[in-house]
Image: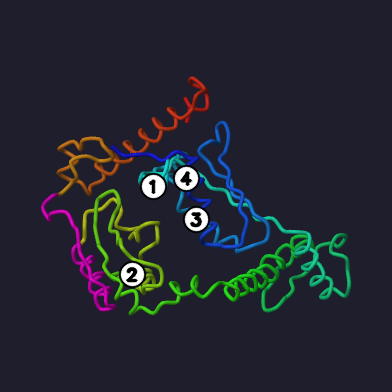
């Protein structure tokens, strides 16, 4: 039976991940309330690029909004979190992560000065619609002054400040802290860090486990179409499909050529459909044509039913209109 990770534990894991990925930045990570209790709000001031934060935050969502069918669809994404000192893996019970980046007065004032320099000392707080302008190689499209100042802050001022802060942090780091990250690939290999496993399951797709930071696997796997979904590399278009042995072997060949020891863990070639999908026994008719349209429709129904059941169970309202109507 699939295990689900409560939103509060997902938020805690996201908070730790952001702190690791963006050292020095301060993030507020909070769970929603009421009907929004399955959502997470992330806010921070200045700091790293908003798109970079969004990219990481999106990997913590367990469902996505299907605007065509007007419902949340389970992504099947797995997440490993720490609960009471133990690592637990399951599907995150979180359907949205909203990221808000605010600007400090200092940054906004600096961006305003750059804007005023271009427009002959005009005050951006009282100006009207303007044409576009170029600031340090970044094109700021025509808009109201307040919008243009915000774009200058995010596209010019903040990237320069964040890069300078990270450079200063690296300079002041103790040599002992830098050594593991800067260790050459040969050192990682000598330490036994070059062994990986390529596996495939219907619900998880093709995955690669066992890689380490800076061991050389990341550029290879990204080039082959994999995405990093901590703690695994996942081939997105393989999820919900049977294993492709030829494609798996191609991945193994690339990794072995880079010095990795590769182990593959694939289901038997004649295994066909799994015995159960998300804990629900697969009907014989669908198992016989597992890649067909009818089986795919059945799987969508299972996904929808499980998401509804979990969301209804997590609400203590006793059956409110929102829960009953989805």
Residue sitting at x 20%, y 68%: 249
The answer to if 262 sits in the magenta stretch is yes
Res. 90 image quadrant: top left
Mark 3 sits on what residue? 17
Q: Where is the N terminus found, in terms of image quarters?
A: top left
Say what secondary structure mark 1 lies in.
loop
Q: Please state which of the two labelled residues, at mark 2 or mark 4, is closer to the viewer.
A: 4
**Bounds of the magenta span?**
245-271
Q: What whole-number distance in Å separates the C-alpha atoms at marks 3 and 1?
A: 20 Å
Mark 4 sits on what residue? 10
Mark before the other along the chain sequence, 3 or 4? 4
Q: What whole-number distance in Å separates the C-alpha atoms at marks 2 and 3?
A: 25 Å
Q: What whole-number distance in Å separates the C-alpha atoms at marks 3 and 4?
A: 10 Å
Q: Is residue 309 rendered to the left or right of residue 25?
A: left
Q: What whole-number distance in Å separates the C-alpha atoms at marks 2 and 4?
A: 29 Å
Tags 3 and 4 touching, CB below 8 Å: no
Mark 2 sits on what residue? 224
Mark before the other along the chain sequence, 2 or 4? 4
Tags 2 and 1 touching, CB below 8 Å: no
Give percent across and percent down for residue 132. Answer: 74, 71
Mark 1 sits on what residue? 75
Mark before the other along the chain sequence, 3 or 1? 3
Q: What whole-number distance in Å separates the C-alpha atoms at marks 1 and 4?
A: 15 Å
| Label placed on residue 104 | none
Residue sitting at x 55%, y 32%: 35
């Amino acid at each position: 039976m699939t295990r689900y990770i409560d939103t509060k534990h997902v938020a805690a894991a996201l908070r730790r991940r952001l702190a690791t990925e963006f050292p020095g930045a301060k993030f507020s990570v909070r769970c929603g309330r009421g009907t929004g209790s399955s959502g997470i709000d992330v806010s921070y001031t200045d700091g790293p690029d908003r798109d970079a934060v969004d990219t990481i935050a999106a990997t913590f969502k367990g469902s996505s909004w299907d605007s065509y069918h007007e419902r949340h669809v389970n992504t099947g994404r797995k997440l490993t979190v720490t609960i009471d000192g133990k690592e637990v893996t399951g599907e995150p019970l979180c359907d949205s992560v909203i990221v808000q980046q605010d600007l400090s007065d200092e940054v906004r004032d600096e961006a305003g000065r750059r804007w005023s320099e271009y427009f002959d000392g005009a005050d951006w707080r009282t100006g009207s619609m303007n044409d576009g302008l170029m600031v340090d190689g970044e094109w700021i499209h025509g808009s109201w002054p307040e919008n243009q100042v915000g774009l200058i802050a995010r596209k010019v001022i903040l990237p320069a400040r964040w890069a300078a802060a990270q450079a200063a942090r690296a300079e002041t780091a103790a040599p002992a802290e830098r050594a593991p990250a800067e260790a050459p690939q040969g050192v990682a290999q000598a330490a036994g860090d070059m062994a990986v496993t390529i596996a495939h399951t219907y619900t998880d797709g093709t995955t690669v486990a066992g890689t380490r930071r800076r061991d050389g696997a990341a550029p290879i796997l990204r080039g082959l179409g994999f995405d990093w979904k901590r703690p695994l590399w996942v081939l997105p278009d393989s999820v919900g499909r049977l294993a492709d042995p030829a494609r798996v072997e191609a991945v193994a060949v690339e990794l072995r050529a880079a010095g990795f020891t590769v182990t593959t863990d694939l289901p038997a070639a004649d295994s066909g459909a799994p015995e159960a999908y998300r804990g629900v026994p697969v009907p014989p008719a669908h198992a016989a044509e597992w890649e067909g349209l009818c089986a795919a429709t059945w799987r969508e129904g299972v996904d929808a039913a499980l998401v509804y059941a979990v969301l209804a169970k997590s609400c203590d309202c006793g059956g409110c209109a929102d829960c009953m109507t989805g």
